[in-house]
Image (cartoon, coloured by chain):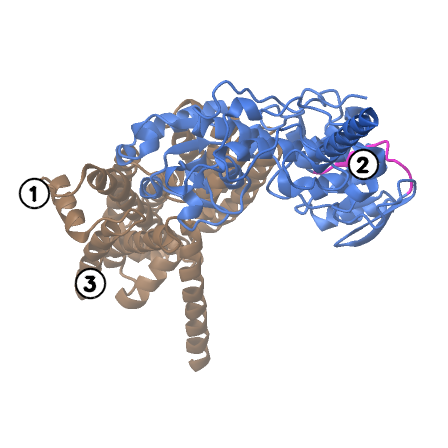
Chain colours: A blue, B brown
Amino acid sequence: MGLVKRALSVAAVAAVAVLIAVCGVEGGASGEDAPSGLPATTFPQVNPTAPPRPAEALTPTPYGRREVNPETISSGLREAKGVVDPTNLGWPREIETEQGRATIKAAPQRVHTLSLGHDEIIVALIGAKRVAGIGSFTADPIYSNIAAEVKDLPKVRRDAEAVLALNPDLVIASKFTNQALIDRIRGAGVTVIRTDLEDSAAGNIPNILLLGYMLGAEKRALELASEIRSRIEAVDLVVRGIPPGQRVRALSIAKFAESIDAAGANTTEGGIVLAAGAVNAAAEADIDGHKAVSIESIAAMKPDYIILTQPVDSGTKFRDELMAAAALAEVPAVKNNRIVLGDPRYYTTLSHWNVRGIEEAAKLFYADKFAGVSFRDFEPFKE
Amino acid sequence: MIGASALAVGGCALILVAAAVGPYPIPLSHTTSALLDWAGLGRSGATATEQAIVETVRLPRIAAAFSVGAALAASGVVLQGLFRNPMADPGIIGVSAGGALGAVAAIATGAAAASALALPAMAFAGATGAVLLVYAIAAAGGRSSMAALLLAGVAVTSFLGAIVSAVIVFTSEQQAQREMVFWLAGGLDSTGWEDVRIVLPVVLVGVAGMLIFARDLNLLLVSEDDARSLGVRVGLTRNVLIVCASLVTGVAVAFSGTIAFVGLVVPHALRLVLGADHRVLLPLSAIGGGVFLLAADTVARTVASPAEVRVGIVTALAGAPFFVFLLLRHKSRAGAL
């Protein structure tokens, strides 16, 4: 009897242990419920009130695809902006935008977009083979993160006839696209859908999910969304514990002709600076959006870091001018030689690639906290 | 005399105000001592940064605004007199369009990136080249008349404007496109003493050249035949005046881009007060143009501080209502007659 009792006790303990183990895996590593349909991150549990852990322990591994459970795709799509019926994973599919409802009859095979950000997202979702053509911006390696992948694709200008010559079955426009152009393309019988792109990678997740649904790549879109969240969280976990008084003050500027343009609040560059754990010096000076500033304004803002978001040649020249300006001699960024050339590909696009801007900026601002950490690009699309 | 004194006093006061205001807070006493130190009249009590901001940021911008404003207004006076057309402004003979073409060419070819002086040099070359083209067209087949110059100027301005648009559209490099658009918007951002050292002497020489022929311009205003009969060498006078106007406008456009309304509005405003005697109107328009553009630039760089607005927006907002006022005044006078 004693043996039976002992055996039953062991079995009960083992069952409880198994139960706890199963619940722990499903609960998510961060201690919060993972969004439906999105896989848990691979990070260890983090207590938000605990001091930040060394960056090495928090480097997300591995980068790249995280498998999504097909059964959770519909629930995951609820986060998408404009999917009429997330449970419909067949064709035709309906989506709803500010301009009304549109039907996509079958998975598009010849897609053309009218913006760089859209191109980067759709190439990440479906690869370059299903892209009918690109604009000049997308082919420019200075600004585009996919220039190498799309170099063999036809390049067209933003002109109805040129776009129609690509014989696209779906055209995706941005909020900046001229309505007359959209109407002319639609008038030729091509489905044109205008979707917004936000000025942050996290803000674009609903758009990415919508694009994935439109293209029949919803699973890949959910995986990409998961990776975006993970990577942003990896940086946030390190920088969130930095007291406000110890955060660096960073200013993102670019020079065009003789005019200096500063990125204030509600800009992509400003969002990158904030997500990297710094204070946006321009936003702090009540600059909203992109505004022209002067050397004197930069002296008044006194940033610790200045990030120049323009190509290397012009950026180097501008950096030299700033370093030589007598009026900026006491500005910490100049005094401590902290004027840095930011990669325009990460700052001027509106896609998941903004995450790379956050990672590189965080590593720049808090080098000691990210010592030994090397961030990698998003992996190219694979069949 | 009173008008000249008022302009002079107002101009000096405005210079002090412009030197005292800006996004970097500097106490007035420090600004004053920085100015005196710069002029060699005292020792500065300002910090090194404050001194540098006054000396290397605000003062050259003040000098540039004054020079460019003076150039545009003086040219406006001369061209309105020569063409006997109240709508004439410095751009009428193709200078602005030529300067714009030179500037976008400098950016598109990479010359602007290679040397700080390349852009203004090419803009100036474009401006003078456009004037020569206008002259050549107007003079084709015989002596050129003012009407022919006017028509040729309109044609060349349109033609060069189309080429500028084409260069922008067909430039594949995005950074270069942005540079072109920003330059065309016009402004006095980033002006330094190295720019003033070029602009100011050219403007002084050009305006002096115009002043020499101010009396002759009065006579030309009546008619060319009457002026000729009174001993005016009409051809020489006209050519020198146009060359001077082109020279100062070209150098202004080269460094500041295209700033609208100064050359149109200031001459009209001062003509209302001073009359049409160019011996008085010309020098005071130059000063008035400098004061007007300096005031506009001071507003542009402080109204949304630390951000700046384009000075062309301020000049247009100030100039357009004044133009409506002139038009209504002209209509009511015509009605009264």
Amino acid type at circle 2 is: Glu
Q: Quadrant of the C terminus of chain B?
A: bottom left
Residue A131 drawn at (x, y percent): 79, 29
Q: Over which residues does the magenta segment extend? A: A105-114
The quadrant in which residue A334 appears is top left
Camera-side mark, 3 or 1: 1
Amino acid type at circle 1 is: Leu
Residue B160 drawn at (x, y percent): 54, 39
Callout 2: chain: A
Bin the neighbour count of mark 2 within 10 Å (Cα to Cα): few under 14, some 14-19, many 20 and up. many
Which residue appears farthest toward the top when viewing the image? Answer: A372
What residue is disc 3 on? B6
The residues bearing labels 3 and 2 have C-alpha atoms spaced at a distance of 73 Å
> At numbered mark 2, what does the secondary structure look like: helix, strand or loop?
helix
Camera-side mark, 3 or 2: 2
Towards the viewer: B108 or B136: B108
